[in-house]
Image (cartoon, coloured by chain):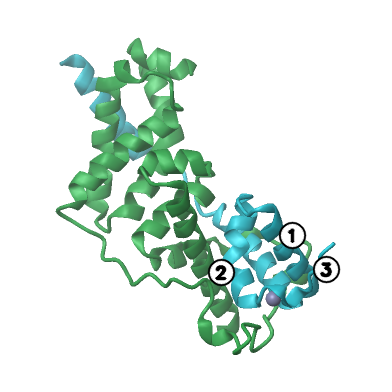
Amino acid sequence: MLLLRPKDIACRQAVELVTDYLEGTLSRGDRRRFEFHIRGCPNCSAYLEQIRMTIQATGTVGEDDLTPEARDDLVNLYRRWKSK
Amino acid sequence: MELVGRLRDGDEDAFVMLVARYHQPMLRLARSMVSSEAVAEEAVQDTWIGVVRGIERFEGRASFKTWLFRILVNRVRSAATREQRNAPAESPQAVDPARFDAQGQWADPVERWPQQSDDRFEAAMWAPILKAALEDLPSRQRTVVVLRDVEGMSSEEVCSVLGISAGNQRILLHRGRSRLREMLDADWRRG
Ligand SMILES: [Zn+2]
């Protein structure tokens, strides 16, 4: 069995693999190299965690509601269209 | 989807429910593509009219949301030939190359964010910073990040809505997310 050391990919490469890793699109070999690097590298592991937190926080950006005015505008639009 | 069937039958309540569910996500998508609020709003309104008129043509092969967003993207794109959001330069690297040494290792340690040791991490607290940060992304990255991470669509859905390849979608997502992390990071450093 080939023994991979964390240095087998550099941090500069590891950060470019993060999205492919999270998307599950890395080849098995690349995934193993990436995970091995992350386990051995506190910097990249902190970085990966920050990306995960960023994604989670981005998910909260959309919590705004439709205003009653905008809804009424659209309902009026709908009624006008239907009455044609 | 049952609501779609009811819309086909001319049921106004179904229209109102669809509007309540999709209007804000559609506005966010349109705004991610053009800077003019008026153009974005008009494209969304046009889309609703187009949907009501063309609901017969919805075949249910794609999800309703995908179909709806695809119509919107077409409207925005034809409006955007007149009005384009100016795109900041796209940086090809996830992290500023200056942060790495000659061997490609981090030159300085990655500073942990205060919240990283906090198990009561409140993601919603960051929404204001992220809203501003999203505004600073190149338009194509912003659109992909909005659809994936704000609206929670799958990569397949996003590719279908925007008519882009899986590889392209991943690159835009990667650059967008990396840039958002960088901006959050800069925010902590400023304190
Ligand atoms: Zn590393």
Q: Residue flagged by tag 2: what amino acid is it?
A: Arg
**Chain of the residue where label 3 is placed in the rendered structure:** A
Q: Earlier in the sequence, mark 3 or mark 1?
A: 3
Compute the Cα span from label 3 to label 2. Answer: 32 Å
* Mark in front: 3 vs 2: 3
Task: For ligand 1, tell me if the residue under mark 1 lies within 8 Å.
Answer: no
Tell me whether circle 3 and circle 1 mark residues in contact (CB < 8 Å).
no
What percent of the width, then of the height, locates residue B136? 39, 68
- Pick the quarter of the image with the C terminus of chain A: top left
Characterize the local packing of mark 2: few (<14), some (14-19) or many (20 or more) Cα atoms within 10 angstroms.
many
What percent of the width, then of the height, locates residue B118? 77, 67
Horizontal side of residue B175 vs A3, given as left or right: left
Horizontal side of residue B17 vs B124, given as left or right: left
**Chain of the residue where label 2 is placed in the rendered structure:** B
Answer yes or no: are tags 3 and 2 on the same subunit. Answer: no
Label drawn at residue A3:
3
Identity of the residue drawn at 36% across and 64% down = B138
Secondary structure state at the residue bearing disc 1: helix
**Chain of the residue where label 1 is placed in the rendered structure:** A
Secondary structure state at the residue bearing disc 2: helix
Identity of the residue drawn at 39% across and 64% down = B135
Label drawn at residue A32:
1
Q: Chain B hue?
A: green
What percent of the width, then of the height, locates residue A35? 74, 63
Label drawn at residue B181:
2
Tell me whether circle 1 and circle 2 mark residues in contact (CB < 8 Å).
no
Quadrant of res B120: bottom right
Q: According to the colouring, which chain is cyan?
A: A
> Residue placed farthest to the right in the image?
A1
